[in-house]
Amino acid sequence: MNGGHKPRRHLLSITDLDAADIERICNLTESFAEVSRRRIPRVPALRGKTVVWLFYEDSTRTRLSFEAAAKQLSADTVNFSVGSSSVNKGESLRDTVETIEAMGIDAIVVRHSCAGVPHRVADWIDASVINAGDGCHEHPTQALLDLYTARARLGDLHGARVAIVGDVAHSRVARSDVLAFTAMGAEVTLVGPRPLLPASLEGWPVTVSHDLDSVLGEIDVCYLLRMQLEREAGGHVPSLREFRAEYGLDAARADRLRDGALIMHPGPINRGVEIDGDVVERPNVVITEQVANGVAVRMAVLFLLLGSGMDLTESEKMAA
Ligand code: NCD
């Protein structure tokens, strides 16, 4: 997916992409969003291709939207359910992945609690690997849909100010979003209590604030994160109540945002912690748009990784 549209096999990290790749994905996403809105939302672009989900961690949005994306592109899909598989009989990750590949698949969408697992899987097999979230490391398709959603509302993101608020330290979304938003020229500020920000920010192109109230009036995007309690985040703050008092987006704080500033969240949201229930209903909250755009973004990614050189115009012709 890099310069000159050289075909790429995997999407493991936002660093696999340059600004031109991201631009191309956004453009393709726009075309696929149009496909999604059709009465029969289906194009034959990936007919004959098989995509497998390998999710070792819980997911609602990511897995369902990859599934919808693959179906709308006419790919066959296989859902590998870790909970009822031979993983429970002690089968290793490598043996599991090689078994799946032996059945003839074209892409594997991997989510795992350990950072780097999708990269290992990519070393072992010939099929395309898409990282759907690896530990606290990265979640590239989430960042692409966040970027697409912000651009759709705000236009060019050069100079746009984005605050990523909350449990940044345990968030793979934050890492991928920092890379994606800064690649498109936005300025990112990480906001949270010291223990919930990464221990070292060396190499992160960001500024840091511990005071949400002082940044609210200056930002174009307020991107909220859930406290990742499954990664022990709770032990880093005195209590969720205290976290909410300083960093939760309640109505009074939401009122201080500039006109047109967006409130974003990757989901799942914890109402009454990082965002209050009455704020969720406001028109500048784009959480549902993020979910909706997730399907078209994942169509674009699957198409670019698996679409055998056929350009969209041809596939559109086939769909007519
Ligand atoms: C995120 C994830 O799983 O990393 N959710 C998602 O994919 N939309 C964020 C989270 O779990 O808080």
Image (spheres, helix red, strand yellow):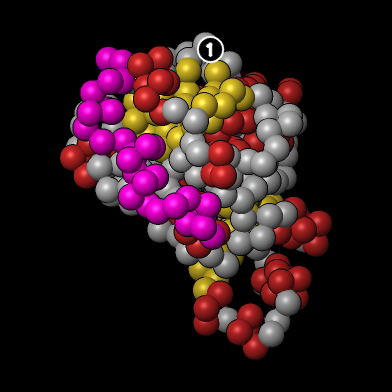
> Looking at the image, which residue is at 65% across and 36% down?
14
Q: Is residue 183 magenta?
A: no
Q: Residue furthest front?
A: 238
Q: Where is residue 155, by image quadrant?
A: top left
> Can residue 228 be seen here?
no
> Looking at the image, which residue is at 47% across and 50% down?
237
Between residues 243 and 201, which one lies in front from this camera angle?
243
Type of residue at label 1? His
The x and y percentages for residue 37 are 31, 37
Q: Is residue 222 above or below residue 195?
A: above
Residues drawn in magenta: 232-259
The x and y percentages for residue 279 are 23, 36
Q: Residue furthest bottom?
A: 89
User: In the structure shown, which secondary structural element does the residue marked by tag 1 occupy?
Assistant: loop
Q: Where is residue 32, by image quadrant?
A: top left
Q: Give the overall secondary structure of the magenta segment.
A: helix
Quadrant the N terminus occupies = top right
Between residues 267 and 7, which one lies in front from this camera angle?
267
The x and y percentages for residue 24 are 58, 25
Q: Is residue 249 magenta?
A: yes
> Looking at the image, which residue is at 73% across and 29% down?
203
> Can residue 94 be seen here?
yes
Q: Is residue 9 above or below residue 118?
A: above
